[in-house]
Amino acid sequence: MHIALHTFYFQIAMEHYQKYMECLNQYNELTDNNAQWDIFSKDPEQNQSYFGLFRDKEKNAIITVVFLVMSVESLINEYGFCFLGEKKFNEFDKGNVIDKVVNIYFEATGKQFPKDKQLYQSLYDLITVRNTLVHSKSIEVDIETLMGNDIEADKQFLANINSMLGNKRNKETKQKFLDEILTSSVNVYSELITFLKQ
């Protein structure tokens, strides 16, 4: 039985998106819909639950984003190879993902990819977040804190994730940014398949 690589990547993304949603729901229930968490007013078990859920939510969000982009890139590679042939496709193979989508679509159909549509914006946002995650810059890490108790290590881990998500945004904004992009872009693979079939 043959399964396209992009389908396999998408299945992995959806498995982790489901886990992300489960963690998000538990996290929202625990925090009263992401209210400020005061670690000093909570007992160690509550803090452990909080940081564990946050870490698991972030981990599954990151895996989902990375595999969604992998599924999109694999899909456009297959589309380009099938519709353009190997020689012409190889001219586009080294480009970034968004350029490959736009250029391969144009070469295959003679039409411009609609950059004014939500599909393009969702692709762009998702790929931008993925690039920020996988091409992140080095950040200073306090090894003693990471090696310390679990709560402090978790807090440092979360601070590192938020630093990577970037550009001097505060924790709440960064978290909202990742959650919003993931929510708005989770269907981008399916929408791209539908669009390419038109």
Image (cartoon, rainbow, N blue to C red):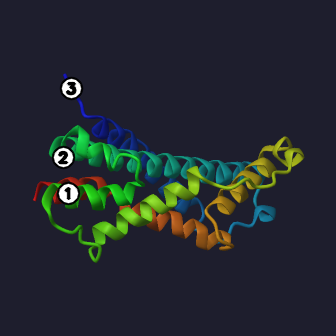
Apparent side of residue 196 relative to residue 52 in the rendered image (left or right)? left
Residue at (20%, 57%) from the top-left corner?
107
Q: Amino acid at mark 3?
A: His
Q: Earlier in the sequence, mark 1 or mark 2?
A: 2
What residue would you read off at disc 1?
107
Q: Earlier in the sequence, mark 3 or mark 2?
A: 3
Apparent side of residue 90 relative to residue 166 in the rendered image (left or right)? left
In x, y percent, where is residue 122? 36, 66
In x, y percent, where is residue 136? 63, 54
Cα–Cα gap, marks 1 and 3: 27 Å
Residue 24 position (above or below residue 89): below
Residue at (84%, 41%) from the top-left corner?
147
Residue at (29%, 62%) from the top-left corner?
102
* Residue 32 appears in view: no
Closer to the camera, 83 or 3?
A: 83
Locate the N terminus and report the quarter of the image it occupies: top left
Q: Earlier in the sequence, mark 1 or mark 3?
A: 3
In x, y percent, where is residue 165? 61, 62
Q: Amino acid at mark 1?
A: Glu
Which tag is nearer the camera, tag 1 or tag 3?
1
Closer to the camera, 9 or 104?
A: 104
Mark 3 residue element:
loop
**Which circle marks residue 98 in the picture?**
none
Q: Are marks 1 and 3 in contact (CB under 8 Å)?
A: no
What residue would you read off at disc 2?
84
Q: Amino acid at mark 2?
A: Leu
Q: Are marks 1 and 2 in contact (CB under 8 Å)?
A: yes
Apparent side of residue 169 relative to residue 155 in the rendered image (left or right)? left
User: Could you say which quadrant of the image residue 125 lies in?
Assistant: bottom left
In x, y percent, where is residue 184? 37, 66
